[in-house]
Amino acid sequence: MSLKRIFCLAAAACLTVSAAVFADTPQPPEISAHAAYVMDADTGDTLYAKNADDRAYPGSTTKIMTGILGVELGKAQGKMDQPLNITNDVYNIESDASVLGIDPGDQITLRHALTGMMTVSGCDAAVAVAETVTPTQADFVAKMNEKAAALGCTNTHFANPHGLPDSDHYSTARDMATIAAYGMKMPEFRDMVSHSEYDMPYINGGSKHCTTTNYFLTSGFPGANGIKTGTTNAGGPCLVASATQDGRTVIASIMNSDDRFGDAQKLMAYGFSVLKPVEPAENVYILRQAPAGQTLSDIKEKQAQAAELASQQKQEAATAAASTAAAKAPVKTATKVKTATETAAKTAAKTTAKTAAKADTVKTSKPAVSSQPYVPFSPAA
């Protein structure tokens, strides 16, 4: 076979293999959103990015941060199951804004109001939540920005708790996904963003029926479980979506899309297709299902702690066994010595007694009468 023919066959084989590999590699989807970001919520790995750091108006996805602080501050203050503080400030919002429909005097717990707020995107509820866990809305907004900075969201700044447009109110697809991933680690938050329908109860009886604005929840996508929509004229339709499959959670943040729910399905499908498998640590227990809100780093840290504890317990057990053996050895030897001594003493006592008895016998007994004639002692005999 000629060298030229061999070269051609090798080149053809390489092209065939490359084509097969390319065909098996998932390709990023075409989406209509101006910006999007997809991440592994457990590891923080980036799975997809498009204009992820472009600043934009987040709209009501802002309420993700409002919900997070509502839970954290509400729990810290013991207010989760206490009545919401509803003032006339709930009326000081734009007339076309989405509302939960609450009024001063309504008896609703903070927990239920948060769930209603996240379900129907209630701007009035966001105001009441802020005024329940902090003295004023301004105080609450300050905490929103502190939290964003703590999470590393360097391109985010909030001006209100509901997300209505403000020139100083902005975020990015990456930052909103990061904030959402943090929230999904909290069981209370995870529950309140998962309802497609919710009957919000009043403390004094009755309820208000709420229907979600997040149609991704009802799209049929496997494991869909959140999170929040947002729509403003300035920022366009936005969505932060989440889904959990086999214990792994993926989050997609979409900004200004003409087809946000369609984009969400494409991005989610792609995200799960390129999700990296988690490598278990060796020689330690394996946690198959991570509890809600727990990261891979948390799991690894606990595994390392468990391994270290097991090693310490093993070493302590060996040390205790050695100490016990050492303590028993002298006692056993001493017992043997004591026993031998006592036995010797008894034997000596018996011998002395016998000797004394014989001596007494020699001193007091008369010689025995023999029938044999007396023979004097002779050394020569």
Image: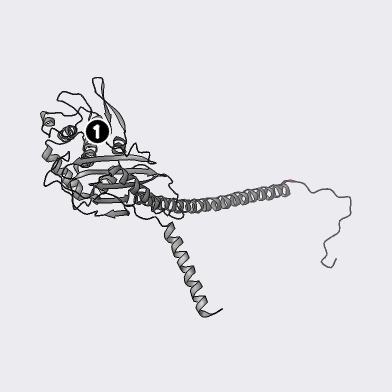
Residue 349 at least partly seen: yes
Question: Left or right: where does residue 161 sit relative to residue 297?
Answer: left
The answer to whether residue 54 is left or right of residue 312 is left
Q: Dot 1 corresponds to which residue?
A: 120
Residue that appears at 29% across and 35% down = 192
In the rendered image, residue 79, in percent from the top left (x then y), is placed at 22, 31
Does 68 sit above or below residue 171? above
Across and down, in percent, residue 307 comes to: 42, 52
Left or right, 310 with respect to 267, comes to: right
Residue 165 lies, in percent from the top left, at: 14, 42
Closer to the camera in the image, 31 or 231: 31
- 5, above or below 266, in the image: below
Residue 287 forms part of the magenta stretch: no
Q: Secondary structure at mark 1?
A: helix
User: Within the magenta stretch, is there residue 374?
Assistant: yes
The magenta span reads 364-381
Magenta stretch, overall SS: loop
* Pick the front one: 50 or 368: 50
Residue 265 in the image, given as x and y percentages of width and height: 34, 45
What's the amino acid at mark 1?
A: Val
Residue closest to the far top: 205
Figure quadrant of the C terminus: bottom right
